[in-house]
Image (cartoon, rainbow, N blue to C red):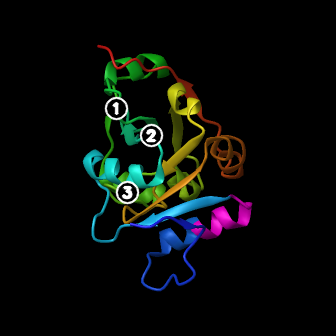
């Protein structure tokens, strides 16, 4: 795997959701680096660990969650090495116990497929059905890694660009939580 600056010059064969992601970032003037790994889709944390060594970023989990009633939806971004405890997050968000949301909601709201969950998918949520939730430990990192809405490429950008430019451009005001990974 190689590290490239910015979007691919030749985007033929790439999914529309990926092309939209590059156009969105380029339109904002965001500097980012990319690695492509079509033969090794990063759909699990083990493969993400390899990709993140190339990107030199800390692995993050991106979890698409909902309440029991399936009326409130959340995209949680947290360090990959931190255990996720539903009860801990539910308490901080003051909501009923959270679980993983159905694939149909992921497609409808974020235009994402399982294994490709990315905070950049929020650009597709025009009705703001999904709330961004970010663990405070993510903010401690200078660089942030994520998928460009597909799991066959990965990006690295400044965390400050994510928080201060990208999310505001999407009309997203994230909720910050402090997760300890404890029961």
Secondary element type, mark 1: loop
Spatial CA distance of label 1 from label 3 is: 18 Å
Which numbered disc covers residue 58?
2
Specify few, some or many for label 2: CA neighbours under 10 Å numbering under 14, 14-19, or 20 or more: some
- Magenta span dominant secondary structure: helix
Residue that numbered label 3 is attached to: 116
Q: Is residue 152 above or below residue 138?
A: below
Which residue does the image show at 29% across and 55% down from the upper left? 43
Q: 133 left or right of 106?
A: right
Residue that numbered label 1 is attached to: 81
Q: Give the position of the N terminus as an image quadrant.
A: bottom left
Secondary element type, mark 3: loop
Mark positioned earlier in the residue sequence (2 or 3): 2
Q: Are marks 1 and 2 in contact (CB under 8 Å)?
A: yes
Which numbered disc covers residue 167?
none
Q: Is residue 25 magenta?
A: yes
Q: Position of residue 90 (x, y in %)?
A: 40, 22
User: Which quarter of the picture shows residue 81?
Assistant: top left
Q: Which residues are magenta?
A: 22-30
Which residue does the image show at 58% across and 47% down from the upper left? 128
Q: Residue furthest top?
A: 183
Which residue does the image show at 57% across and 29% down from the upper left? 140
Specify few, some or many for label 1: CA neighbours under 10 Å numbering under 14, 14-19, or 20 or more: few
Judge by depth and name the residue closer to the eye, 173 or 162: 162
């Amino acid at each position: 795997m190689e590290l490239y600056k910015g979007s691919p010059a030749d985007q033929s064969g790439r999914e529309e959701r990926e092309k939209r992601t590059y156009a969105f970032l380029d339109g904002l003037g965001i500097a980012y680096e990319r690695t492509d790994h079509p033969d090794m889709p990063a759909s699990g944390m083990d493969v993400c660990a390899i990709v993140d060594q190339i990107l030199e970023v800390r692995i993050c989990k991106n979890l698409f969650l909902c309440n029991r009633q399936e009326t409130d939806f959340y995209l949680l971004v947290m360090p990959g090495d931190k255990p996720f405890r539903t009860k801990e997050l539910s308490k901080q968000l003051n909501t009923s116990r959270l679980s993983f949301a159905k694939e149909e909601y992921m497609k409808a709201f974020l235009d994402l497929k399982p294994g490709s969950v990315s905070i950049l998918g929020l650009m597709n949520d025009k009705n703001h059905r999904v709330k961004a939730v970010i663990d405070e430990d993510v903010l401690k990192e200078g660089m942030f890694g994520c998928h460009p809405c597909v799991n066959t490429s990965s990006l690295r950008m400044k965390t400050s660009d994510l928080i201060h430019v990208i999310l505001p451009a999407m009309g997203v005001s994230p909720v910050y939580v402090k997760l300890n990974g404890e029961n």
